[in-house]
Amino acid sequence: MAMQEDGGQDRNLRVMARWRSTARVLVEALPYILRYDNQTIVVKYGGHAMEDGVNRNFAQDIVLMKQTGIEPVVVHGGGPQIGQMLKKLQIPSQFIDGLRVTDAAAIEVVEMVLAGSINKQIVSTINAAGGRAVGLSGKDGNLVVARKLERLKRDPDTGAASIVDFGFVGEPETINPEVLHTILRSDLIPVIAPIGVGRNGETYNINADTVAGAVAGAMHAARLMLLTDVEGVLDRDKKLIPKLTVAEARALIADGTISGGMIPKIETAIEAVEAGVTAAVILDGRIAHALLLELFTEHGAGTLITA
């Protein structure tokens, strides 16, 4: 009998210890919850993170952010899913400098995948987690008015410059934040597909990081959070750099420490900060509840970039 009582007491002590640990976490998070109260935070959710479906942890993080007084805005990608659908429909894909050349046939597929299936998957997963999300693309309410992307390429032999034609690939020209303000005032969570509209009604495929940065700047967001499949920015010894200023980030690009696919993400972060966003974060989306760890704990979960 005494052994049973001792066992019961041990279980009670373990339960109490867990409760105290939970209470401690909540108390530690309180200053951060107060800091971001009524602040807009733009989250870019990449297509690679959705190859096995929309992550439930991500949806829970977005809902909890909303419930603590934050105004989350989600911008999503979908490159792998677009590639799969184009392959299925036997529409060839061509990439130049990492950008998909998007012709008239491909843009229909891009819009169908981004504004259709992927957007609605994210919306439904957030709603299933207890949120109230609404899906839209940059074409809705002229949210993202875009222009055709133009880049110069030089012939390595002659040095002659020519314009690369990416087809229906664009870049944001103007962002209409009032569309998002209206949605946020309705206590909804906007989920944006990175499709823009041209001045003459053309449809443009736009890089999701670029759209997220432009939206964050237009909304004067407190944070731009770019979820990736790496830890963040690494130094030459492959160790995570937790914080960078804009000047330090540019220096790391110049000396080659930041290279490859990380460069456009850092450039997006820099542009957002220079447009008025308080800080941008390159965040490891593979970590469970990475958004909450970054926002509500002291150590964070990625690389923070500030002015």
Image (cartoon, helix red, strand yellow):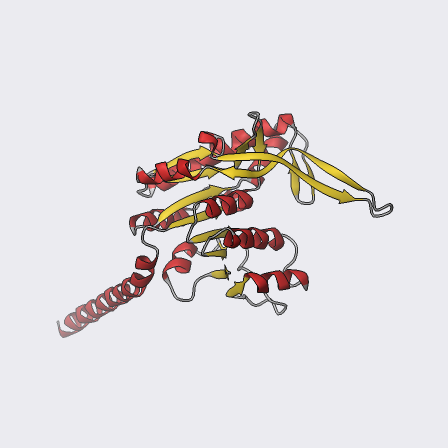
Seen at 30% across and 42% down, the residue is 130
Quadrant position of the N terminus in the picture: bottom left
Question: Foreground residue, 263 or 158?
Answer: 158
Seen at 30% across and 50% down, the residue is 69
Q: Position of residue 143 (x, y in %)?
A: 47, 35
Tell which residue pokes out farthest to the right in this image.
Answer: 158
Give the image quarter of residue 19.
bottom left
Give the image quarter of residue 188.
top left
Is residue 229 visible in the rendered image? The answer is: no
Is residue 78 visible in the rendered image? The answer is: yes
In the rendered view, would you say 229 is above or below 169? below
Tell which residue pokes out farthest to the left in this image.
Answer: 1
Q: Position of residue 172 (x, y in %)?
A: 55, 39
Label tally: 0
Q: Position of residue 25 (x, y in %)?
A: 30, 64
Question: Foreground residue, 159 or 127?
Answer: 159
Question: Foreground residue, 155 or 50?
Answer: 155
Give the image quarter of residue 167.
top right
Question: Foreground residue, 44 or 231?
Answer: 44
In the rendered view, would you say 137 is above or below 41? above
Seen at 33% across and 59% down, the residue is 35
Q: Position of residue 28 (x, y in %)?
A: 31, 65
- In the image, taking residue 23 as reference, residue 216 lies left or right, namely right
